[in-house]
Amino acid sequence: ESLDELAMLDNPDPKQVANLIDSAVKAKTSDSRRLNTNQFYSCTLSGAAARIAVRDWIEISLDEYKQNIAKWFQEIGIRAYGETRYTPLYELARAGHNTKSDNDPTNSRIATQLWNAALKGTIPALWILTAVLKRIRYVENSDDGISKESMTPEKAALIRFVLNRNSNTGGYMIKEQNDPNDTRSAIVCGKIFAVMEGIQRAAQGKNLNAGIRERFFSFASTNPAPAFGRLMKLSQNHISKLKHERPGLAFVLDRQLQELCSLLDGFPAAFSLEEQGQFALGYYHQKQQDYDNAKNNKELQSIIENNKEE
């Protein structure tokens, strides 16, 4: 039997993924008592000095194999610039990899974890979250000399996957796109930070060099109370400037900020590792929501395009 699902892990096509998920749902609701006569086997090898070592062995039914991969795609999907994106497995693994180091084993370690998660439905280790958050906070000088932090769809997808798989409570799962019903404080704080960044971009435009993302992202995602105390003052200064130059935009952004702040009963003193991941996703989802909204608002488009991650 052809195992097209393995090829999809390397090159996921949205239509094929949708068909796989649909067929997996139908198979799950059919008679589950039928015999699973076909099996799937996977052997992972690696070199060890002059020998070959067996690193992993997988033996599951084909039905379970397909169900696990369908679930994988449901959990790694992420909204990215107007569409749902499914990241190839090894690109997802590289989201937590230190690209500046040739000897960093993180990429292969994450890839092994994700391979098992995709095929066996296992829970990835939380240390992956630490690795990818470190990559988001890492400030790198681009070709034009401007320092930029990077929050890409691949990093957002990996964070979402790790958080949801490690949710032991069976509670509210993080969706692939902005969810107004998710009012957890870390999620909301991430959204507030994204709106504040947009306000700063609108007020300073192309004159902005190192903005609040470069200067405050790490601080706000770990110790929100003191960080947002300073950020709120900055945002009000930017709003005041906008009111004189672009009053309509100032009203829209200020209302957006106030609505999000009203969801909080004060800013928390500190965030746990999982909450730091939620903060990053809240930030990412808000930026994507703003991108979608800007399609029909010419005044907002300049802000989004100036702040779009490639």
Image (spheres, helix red, strand yellow):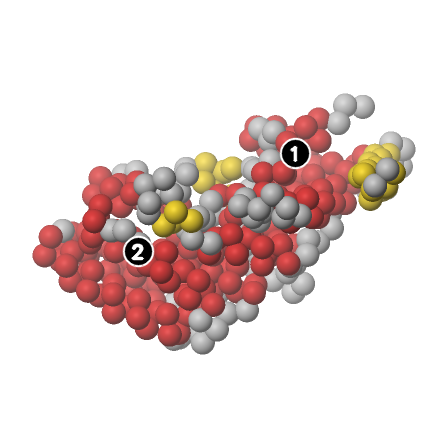
- Residue 70, image x, y percentages: 67, 39
x 87%, y 32%: residue: 38
Q: Distance between the residues labelled 1 and 2?
A: 37 Å
Choose top left, top right, bottom left or bottom right for residue 302.
top left
Q: Is residue 281 left or right of residue 263?
A: right
Residue type at mark 2 is Gly
As helix, strand or loop, the secondary structure at mark 1 comes to: helix
x 87%, y 38%: residue: 51
As helix, strand or loop, the secondary structure at mark 2 comes to: loop
The image's mark for residue 211 is 2
- Residue 6, image x, y percentages: 71, 31
Estimate how packed mark 2 is, as few (under 14), some (14 to 19) or many (20 or more) residues with alpha carbons within 10 Å: some
- Residue 17, image x, y percentages: 61, 32
Q: In this view, does 203 lie to the left or right of 289?
A: left
Residue type at mark 1 is Leu
Choose top left, top right, bottom left or bottom right for residue 7.
top right
x 25%, y 65%: residue: 234
Residue 262 shows up from this direction = no
Q: Name the residue under label 1.
A: 9
* Foreground tag (1 vs 2): 2
Residue 234 shows up from this direction = yes
